[in-house]
Amino acid sequence: VDKQRYWYKCKKEGKRASLTPIQMKEMESIGFVWSVNKQHNWSEMFHQLEEYRIAHGNCLVSANCKKYSKLGRWVAQQRHHYKRCISG
């Protein structure tokens, strides 16, 4: 998905890209969103984590649990960003 967004951006800027206009129209026909608001996504995942904490009493979300796999991956990613931030 990230590649499609990158190719779309290249096409819009007049640069060469692997994504054809037909492919762009096909993606749009199924409701594909080219520009993603990362802050909105972060806020949505944070809200899900708040709900998880209320239900389970902690924020120890496992990425291996099918029900919470997306949230678990997001939590792991936040921990990774935190470690990178404090280690410089």
Image (spheres, rainbow, N blue to C red):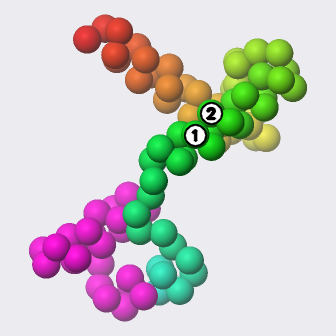
Decide which of 63, 45 is in the foreground and name it.
Answer: 45
Residue 86 falls within the magenta-colored stretch: no
With respect to residue 81, does 27 lie above or below? below
Type of amino acid under label 1: Ser
Most extreme residue toward the right is 55
Type of amino acid under label 2: Phe
Q: Residue at x 30, y 72 (%)?
A: 8
Q: Quadrant of residue 7?
A: bottom left
Mark 2: secondary structure: helix
Q: Position of residue 21 (x, y in %)?
A: 31, 88
The residue identified by callout 1 is 43
Q: Position of residue 20 (x, y in %)?
A: 29, 85
Is 86 displayed left or right of 71 in the figure? left
Tell me where the magenta segment starts and ends, as one range. 1-25
Residues under numbered marks 1 and 2 in contact, where contact means CB atoms less than 8 Å apart = yes
Q: Residue at x 70, y 19 (%)?
A: 59
Quadrant showing the C terminus: top left
Confirm whether residue 64 shows in the render.
Answer: no
Q: CA distance from mark 1 to mark 2?
A: 5 Å
With respect to residue 82, does 28 lie above or below? below
The residue identified by callout 2 is 46
Count up the numbered dots.
Answer: 2
Is 59 displayed left or right of 54 in the figure? left
